[in-house]
Amino acid sequence: MAIGMKLPMAVTLQKPMAMAMAAPSSSSSLHRAINFRTVSCSNATSKAKIPMPPINPKDPFLSKLASVASTSPETLLNRPENSDSPPYLDIFDAPRLMAAPAQVERSVSYNEHRPRRPPPDLPSLLLHGRIVYIGMPLVPAVTELIVAELMYLQWMDPKEPIYIYINSTGTTRDDGETIGMETEGFAIYDAMMQLKNEIHTVAVGAAIGQACLLLAAGSEGRRYMMPHAKAMIQQPRVPSSGLMPASDVLIRAKEVITNRDTLVKLLAKHTGNSVETVSNVMKRPFYMDATLAKEFGVVDKILWRGQEKIMSAVVAPEDWDKGAGIKVVDES
């Protein structure tokens, strides 16, 4: 009887042990299934990833924009409609936004700080504000992107203005080496002239050579410049000839002269100066700060906060003469 009582108990003890021995295999198969689904989903996501356009990672404007987008993207997406001020330029004058601490979470294992969400896609964020940002030299890849964005924004709404922010050295590098054909700048210029939209141009860094032409080609009264931005016009340069025959070098030189004459005529048209004046100042690189660029006719207004308040406190010339004891004689 005692032996008969022990057998069922042994059988009952073996069942949980068998289930416990089988549990790791089932859990490992479950983990493998989950990992397989994760890998397959990540592969599908990577295959569907949209290619990013060329962006200069050291560009100060994009750096500030990314910082604000990571802390408070709703500030950039839900913006008031005001056509008189170009969008996103208040980032330069909003230290409260730039100094706001990022939203972080504490890692239990390594005590690391990581942002909760990545910043939005910057080109998409700029297009949401109808901004076309030229932040690199004018090479074919950049020209293709800029022209495509202009056409897209006109297709979205042919009545709303388009804002072109410029921080480019044109078809040359900052050391003067030619890296793009002059036709790259002319292609963007022709696309701007074909648009039905009003075009606002803003210099946020440097506008050199062909980029200066794009800055001056904005709609009348809608060409702006940041206080410390620079503009410069110069003659086109002959690309590296290498081991080309002398006859081919001569052909290239003639083409550069033709492009120079075209650039002079277009700058004279948009700045209001004569062709002779523009041609004379372009004999050597002609640098302009914001004030000189406004006097030369490249831009219409300098953007800096507090300007209206300061100008409103300026005494009129007649009142200043009267206070200084200067008597104005009426020649009539």
Image (spheres, helix red, strand yellow):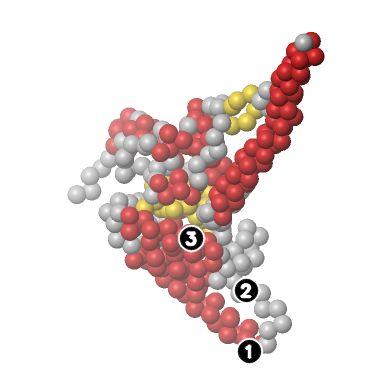
Q: Are the residues at dot 1 and dot 2 in contact (C-beta closer than 8 Å)?
A: no
In the rendered view, would you say 10 is above or below 234? Answer: above
Residue underneath mark 3 = 145
Give the side of residue 58 with respect to residue 129, left or right: right
User: Is residue 278 at least partly visible in the picture?
Assistant: no
Mark 2 = which residue? 239
SS label for mark 3: helix
Q: CA distance from mark 1 to mark 2?
A: 15 Å
The image shows residue 41 at horizontal and vertical percentages of 57, 47
The dot on residue 205 is none
Which of marks 2 and 3 precedes in the sequence? 3
**In x, y percent, where is residue 258?**
49, 78
Q: Residue furthest top?
A: 2
Which kind of residue does numbered mark 2 sit on?
Pro
Question: Going 50% across and 27% down the picture, which residue do you hit?
Answer: 96
Residue at (77, 10) in percent of width and height:
1
